[in-house]
Image (cartoon, rainbow, N blue to C red):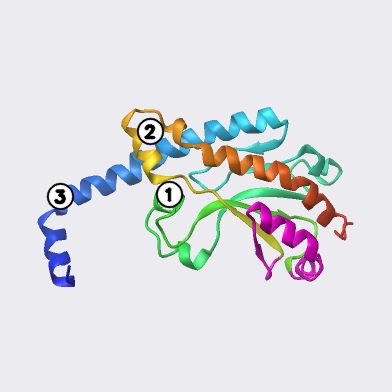
Amino acid sequence: MSQAELNALIVANIQDLDAAAHHLDQVLQHSIAEAIDERLEDLIKQAAWDGAPGWNDGDAWVAPKAWHRPDHGADEYSAYFECDVDDKKLDARDAYQLTQLVGKAHARRGFRWVQQPMGNAAWAKIAGKCLAEIQELRSLGFEYREKDGTFFLPIVVDPDELASALADDDISRALGSVDRGFETMQTAVRVFNRLLTNLVVD
């Protein structure tokens, strides 16, 4: 299809496209985010971790209680997993978070592991030398970011499974990737604990 044909097709169907875009942005994405948050709340409780939902706003985070540093403040942790995108520049090219969630956009959504006490540059130098840990985390599905020493775990929901679940009004049925992602983070804690022994804290 040529650009001219595409332009004509869009204008010919502009009312339906506008209605679909509004529904996607104002209703569908929020419904799916609420289902993900409910699942995250259950997983956090089952694991006896700390954390909070907030998938739609990008505020979701989780962490083992052992990473908490209460002597430094109620919100202080040695590290935590936060809801994020894999690439901020690519994120700016995407119109909808849902497109990212189902792996059909430029950026992907998931959880990024970050440490709190040290500056990014200083930590990246330390983390970059931990080659065994980097390799082990990559084998679990994490992607390593050399610039700041963080690790990103994509969470991708199968679009066909999600479409089928939506047709049956049962979004939770399609969220197996959220469960698997959380299980991967739990499995990876032992490796991240080894990384955290290198932290320089006050």
**What's the amino acid at mark 1?**
Val
Quarter of the image holding residue 51?
top right
Tell me which secondary structure the magenta stretch mostly adopts.
helix
Q: Quadrant of the C terminus?
A: bottom right
Q: First in sequence: mark 3 or mark 1?
A: 3
Label 2 to label 3, Cα distance in Å? 27 Å
Q: Residues within 10 Å of mark 1 (few under 14, many from 20)?
A: some
166 or 22, nearer to the observer: 166
Answer yes or no: do the residues labelled 2 and 1 have beta carbons within 8 Å?
Answer: no
Find numbered disc 3 in the image and state the secondary structure of the residue it sits on.
helix
- Whole-angstrom CA distance, mark 2 to mark 1, is 13 Å
Q: Is residue 185 left or right of residue 128?
A: left
Give the residue drawn at x 57%, y 46%: 59
Return the x and y of residue 67 as percentages of the image width and height.
80, 44
Q: CA distance from mark 3 to mark 1?
A: 25 Å
Question: What is the tally of numbered marks visible in this picture?
Answer: 3
The extreme front residue here reads: 139
The residue carrying mark 2 is 165
Residue 128's disc number: none
Q: Is residue 18 magenta?
A: no
Image quarter (top left, top right, bottom left or bottom right) of the N terminus: bottom left
Residue drawn at (83%, 47%), measured in percent from left and top? 72
* Circle 3 residue: 15
> Residue at the spot x=53%, y=31% of the render?
38
Q: Nearer the viewer, mark 2 or mark 3?
A: 2
Instruction: Give percent across and percent down for residue 4.
Output: 14, 71
Q: Position of residue 121 (x, y in %)?
A: 75, 70
Give the crowd class for mark 3: few <14, some 14-19, many >=20 residues within 10 Å.
Answer: few
Mark nearer the N terminus (2 vs 1): 1
The span shown in magenta is 121-148
- Disc 1 designates what residue? 102
The residue nearer to you, when weighing 23 against 197, is: 197
